[in-house]
Image (cartoon, helix red, strand yellow):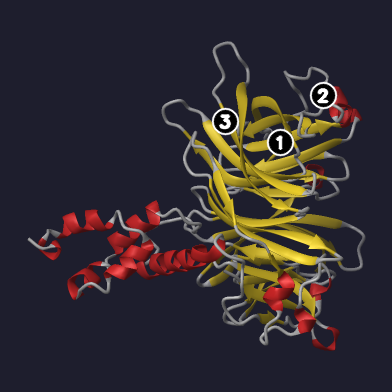
Amino acid sequence: MTLTSLPHDVLYRVLSFLSVREIICLRLACKDLRDLTFHTAIWHDAYTHAKLPRPLGPLDSQSREFLETTLVKSTQVGVKWNKQALTITSKATWFEPEWSALQEDHWEVVAGLWLVIPHISGPDILCYDLERGLRHVIYHAEGAQILSFKSATSEAADGGCIMHAIVMESARNSVSFSHKLLSIRFSSDGPLLEFSMVIPGDVIGMGMSQLSAGKRLLCMSDHLTGTLNLAVDTRTRVLYRFPLPSSIIDPKFDVTCAQETYLKRLIATETHILAMFTPLTMVSQLDEGGNCRVIIQAFALPSAGITGASPPTLELTHEGHCYLDIERVSLLCDSMTSAVTGQTQIKFLTHCMRLNLTKYFAHRVTLSPPLPGQKLGNISFSTDQLFSVPGYANTMKFTTSFDGHARGICVLHNERDGTEFYGFTIDASGMDKPCSGIVGPGVDIKEVEATESFPSSLRMTWNVKLAFDGYLGRICYRKRGQAGRNVLAVVDLA
């Protein structure tokens, strides 16, 4: 009996254990096996089990071509990402918008494919398709001008990307202003403004400091008053307030929180919002690594549903403390909940700079249901050291998939020595499974850019804003082009 004589359901089962590279190689064996590799079921299984950064899926709306192309591209980028110094894999290009709107850092690149530019002091938010060169007006402030723009991007339920943006705008010839929340969906068809809603001034406050978006929840803090002031359920489009400060760990928390300045960090996920507090009076309480004691609180949508209050208030569900540098925290894996224990686990990435080394850590926050007689559930905390790079890497960018596979770069900026890149990969998949990471050798960006396709005028400087997409291995940054106009440099690395 030959392999091709087996029933198709048995062959599908066998092929489900193959990697993406092995499936592609199988096409060279014979015509019958080649035909099998074009079945959607094969790529659904490959997409489900791939240990690669990839968009949400597989979904019924995603074609076999999309699943295969996405996995093959991510596999190609991953082959060399950690094994050798990064190099340019395709011709470096640059993109020049219609106006010099790239003068400051009021721009974002979504999924490495779309450049979003708010026209500060103008009425429009534009989006440029970097692959096809198309231009879209995704928002127009009728009779008003945009004063500020703050955005965060998360995965959509259908596998695309959603940008949530808080826009402050004012009517022309008026000193009054208002805030709006915009939800912009990006797919293969381009950008689409899903909805916009006005945010009451007493909810949002005066300033925007942090904006964090998970699969479902969105939250923001006010840097002028130092308060947690806004949360949004993006599925129901309902605004929520945070409850008044309170703590079981620190009975004086409500008083000190109002009187002192706190270092705060917010992480929004699908099920909870994590808020991290370090009061200045506790900065002297350091662990052996020099990290401060942090109070962590978890908030969730009210279990009793929405009451008559408008806007409704989030529910404080868990509390704990740890030692952590909360200034460098990024979500690594969204919330995963065990159907057996009821525990929810959230993983995030941090880095600290000590003794001319930058060390990277993955932290697992476990939210346990409250025990009988307890008002709040407990928060436990565990840490895995991933890797380190020499020097002080003050910039880190990465893309993480829904199941905790991440690919990124850490950047060492130095005015004297230039800019160095290190590529890294992290596996943070599975509950209660230790996280692991690997980093490749560093490369001076001057060596990467020293090609005929990359003019010297577009080479990166040490203080430039950087956008990164891990699926494509693409970096984008703003530079001064010809005639003094700002352009966006686009470079694919591997």
* In the depicted structure, whether residue 412 falls above or below residue 311: below
Residue at disc 2, secondary structure: helix
Residue ID for mark 3: 366
Q: Which mark is residue 254?
A: 2
Q: CA distance from mark 3 to mark 1?
A: 14 Å
Say few, some or many: other residues with alpha carbon within 10 Å of mark 1 (under 14 / 14 to 19 / 20 or more). Answer: many
Q: Earlier in the sequence, mark 2 or mark 3?
A: 2
Q: Along the horizontal axis of the image, is 479 left or right of 314?
A: right
x 71%, y 41%: residue = 266
Tell me, yes or no, if residue 215 can be seen here.
no
Q: Nearer the viewer, residue 442 or 231?
A: 442
Q: Along the horizontal axis of the image, is 322 left or right of 282?
A: left
Question: Toward which corner of the image does residue 153 lie, by quadrant?
Answer: bottom right
Circle 2: residue type? Asp
Circle 1: residue type? Ala
Q: Earlier in the sequence, mark 2 or mark 1?
A: 2
Q: Nearer the viewer, residue 280 or 391?
A: 391
